[in-house]
Amino acid sequence: MLLEALGLEFQVVVPKIEELSEGDPEEMVLENARWKAAAVAATAPAGSLVIGGDTEVALDGEALGQPGDEAEARAHLHRLSGREHQVLGALALLGPGEDAEGRPATRDGVVSSTVRFRELEPALIEAYLASGEWRGRAGSYAIQGLGSALVESVRGDVSNVIGLPVGLLLELAPELLA
């Protein structure tokens, strides 16, 4: 992982928040990242850099979200078949340091990558669903695993599609490389 390679100590914390699931996908993903960062920062040691992130798949301006069950995952994959969609990745960084009012320093942003799915044969969809990899995944797929067989092309940052937009992280926190 990037942070380990840089010799940085880190801890992954899954905050317990109610995520937004409706509205403008770009605003939604950024707000979710902010809420996650704030929830973790509330219990993090002083001086910590907290990174909250969220990923969403948007098709025709609509957020697909994570599927609730296999039938919904199947419907997502059928909708994505042969089409382009956007993968939106948001990061919200809190601290270290403070702003002029004594609150944790805040930096955030959103990046978009365009993914084109190949025309998906029913047998490929069913095989992918049987793998279970779709569970808990925005848009019902994971490009870093078996889901790569569903993808024809990616324009933009593939690390964003995987789930951590590394370019955006380094833009928001260049001190990670200092």
Image (cartoon, helix red, strand yellow):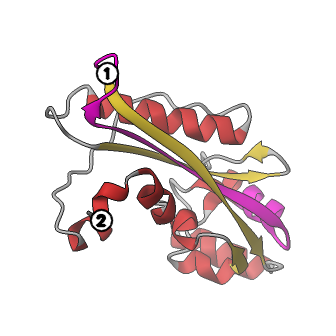
Q: Looking at the image, which residue is at 59% across and 69% down?
A: 157
Image quadrant occupied by the N terminus: bottom left
* Residue 75 horizontal side relative to residue 90, left or right: right
* Residue 38 horizontal side relative to residue 10, left or right: right
* Number of numbered discs overlaid on the protein picture: 2
Image quadrant occupied by the C terminus: bottom left
158, above or below 45, in the image: below
Q: Nearer the viewer, residue 144 or 161?
A: 161
Q: In the rendering, at what x and y percent does residue 29 appear?
A: 59, 41
User: Can residue 148 be seen at all in this image of the molecule?
Assistant: yes
Q: In the rendering, at what x and y percent does residue 158 appear?
A: 57, 72
Q: Looking at the image, which residue is at 50% across and 77% down?
A: 145
Q: In the rendering, at what x and y percent does residue 93 appear?
A: 39, 41
Q: In the rendering, at what x and y percent does residue 94 appear?
A: 34, 36
Q: Residues within 10 Å of mark 2 (few under 14, many from 20)?
A: few
Q: Nearer the viewer, residue 64 or 170?
A: 170
* Type of amino acid at the residue the image marks with label 2: Leu
Give, as a single range, the part of the protein colored magenta. Answer: 74-102
* Type of amino acid at the residue the image marks with label 1: Arg
Location of mark 2 (residue): 177
In whole angstroms, how far apart are the C-alphas of marks 1 and 2? 24 Å
96, above or below 129, in the image: above
Residue 109 falls in which quadrant of the image? top right
Circle 1: element type: loop
Q: Are marks 1 and 2 in contact (CB under 8 Å)?
A: no
* Residue 43 horizontal side relative to residue 175, left or right: left
Q: Magenta includes 167?
A: no
Circle 2: element type: helix
Q: Looking at the rendered structure, which numbered label has been put on residue 12?
A: none
Q: Looking at the rendered structure, which numbered label has been put on residue 103?
A: 1
